Amino acid sequence: MLPFAESDARGGADRKSGDEPVTDHAETQTIDAAERSDYGFQADVARLLELMTHSVYSERDIFLRELVSNSADAIEKLRFEAVANEGLAAQAGAPLVTIALDKEARTLTVADNGVGMSREDLVAALGTIASSGTRAFLDDLEAKGGADKGGSLIGRFGIGFYSAFMVADHIEVATRRAGAAEAFLWTSEGKGSFQIAPLAAEDAPAVGTRVTLHLNAESDEFLEPYRIEQILREHSGAIAIPIDLVEEKGKEPRRLTDGVALWTRPKSEIGEQDYKDFYQQISGQFDEPALTIHWRAEGRTEYTVLAFAPGSRPYDLFDPQRKSRSKLYVRRVLISREADILPSWLRFMRIVVDSADLPLNVSREMVQNNPIIGAIRKAIGTRVLKELSDLAANDAEKFAAVWKNFGAVIKEGLHDDPVRRDEIFAIARFSTSQHQDGGRSLKDYVENLRPNQTAIYYITGDDKKRLASSPQLEGYRAKGIDVLLLDDPVDAFWVTSAVGYDGKPFKSVTQGAADIDAVPAPEGSETPPAKASADVALLTAVLKETLAEHIDDVRVSTRLRESPACLIANDHGFDLQLARMLQESGNKGAFGKPVLEINPSHEAVLALAQKAKADRAGAEDGLWLLLDTARIADGEAPIDAAAFAKRVAALLAKG
């Protein structure tokens, strides 16, 4: 078995790196030319090296993740071989990966005390991509313009080692196979050929591999200890092998990671402060998590999940360019910082997923297309939703804080995720006309329906206080009917796609005729609305004729009690708020005109009716004022702001 690359998890030729702490990595070993063997790269490898910088990886710092990952694999392989040969483990000592920097020599070295390589291993692993499909892969990659355009290419080749040529113009690999006396040095400039020669014992690692990168002029950042530490903590901090950093030649190594990922430890061994520190590390926030979820899934697919609901709302929660904050690991190797693990309506969660079943692919940025991810994504979404449900049932105060921060996002699932809609309805909380502070569930609402009430009534808008005082609510308030106050943008959409809840449909109080006549008012609390007089009937005709450009119809209202007029959407159209939002997106006039309802018992309407009967021309300003005040009450501007101001001024002068 090769020291790396040919495992079924990687498929191709991932090479291995590292050894014990490095002290002489800056010197280039001197090799007698007579002992050196020259090789040409396999043709596909040569093409791959040309494509590497711009086509396969989107970030150059990936090379360090690959080298450390390969080192960890080599150590794991030595552990496996040591089961049959205990002497190998004793020879290697405690597992360790060491990164060493030398600014003067411009070298970066990755060393491990893993299984190492023989001459044959070096030829096979570092000169060949072991897959019959390599040529087709490279042809497709070139044709599609690289990883950004090749989303359908699922990587099957372990080429992590070659990524080092993105930052180095010369690479040396010193290695000794575990249990062997001979050591070898592999060298290449990545331009079509490589050399392998015997390596003197004093220049070779005792066991394992040491990869020395002679960095190119564009890679100064990788000589800075803080940059290496940043990369290692983010990409390789969860690898189950300790990692040391030698910041400069001759300096003592400093331990960066202890080789134990938090999520791999039993929950009983993890304290609240440990979870808090890890949450702050992965989220970049300094608050405390409102909810911590940690579990291991076993069965057909094995993975571990550590997820947090933040204690405060991130500033970019509604940024359309915002990417997921889900980190995906495969056997504790970071594959993606922005994996598509959660449904978009759970994007506020901070989550780490570590899978034992996913392959470490050539294009790790595309690994989320693997079908295993689909199963993991579905299971995690269901589990997180269950945990939120449990929190809502067991700790109402904590859940209220979560809903306050992220309820507007969770409600997106009511529209985008119909399969889970019932479960989301169970945790959704609302403000209502009778409970404006919020916290009302749909279960609470349905349990308090008025006699003969057949629907769940709602009103949508962008200001809860204005919604609570909307004239459209007056008749419902008089009947003792509670109304949902929906002031988030997504509310205008999910109410149109949701069939209903507990057999009760959702119905807008700003659309169509009010259907609440059968609902009895609380005893002694309401005077039935007055019937329209002949003068008011005439007024409706005059209004319809005068305002025809802006309204579809005028009718006597059964919902108004205190206000003179209000606007209502047509029975078979869009709710007023949804129509307004769609019009603002560039579809002006495409959703019809509203209906103007007037209160037949309001003194302003009665006075205007008499005026219109006696002097229609003199009543015109009043007709326009009636429409404009209805628009203002609905959160819209008057038809003509200047004309409205003049009419109000004239009215004040008369008064």
Image (tube, rainbow, N blue to C red):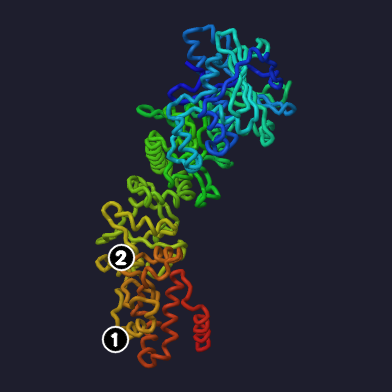
Residue 146: percent from left, percent from top: 51, 40
Which residue: 54% across, 6% down? 87
Image position, residue 350 (x, y; %): 50, 40
Q: Residue 204 in the image: state x and y as whole percent.
A: 64, 14
Q: Give the amino acid at mark 1.
A: Ala
- Which picture quadrant has residue 556? bottom left
Is residue 235 depicted above or below 577 in this figure?
above
Left or right: 339 in relation to 523: right
As helix, strand or loop, the secondary structure at mark 1 comes to helix
Nearer to me, 81 or 378:
81
For residue 243, above or below residue 294: above
Q: Is 304 left, or right, of 450 in this rendering?
A: right
Identify the residue position indicated by label 2 in the image: 522
Q: Nearer the viewer, residue 292 or 416?
A: 416
Q: Say what amino acid the circle numbered 2 marks.
A: Pro
Residue drawn 33% across and 48% down? 418
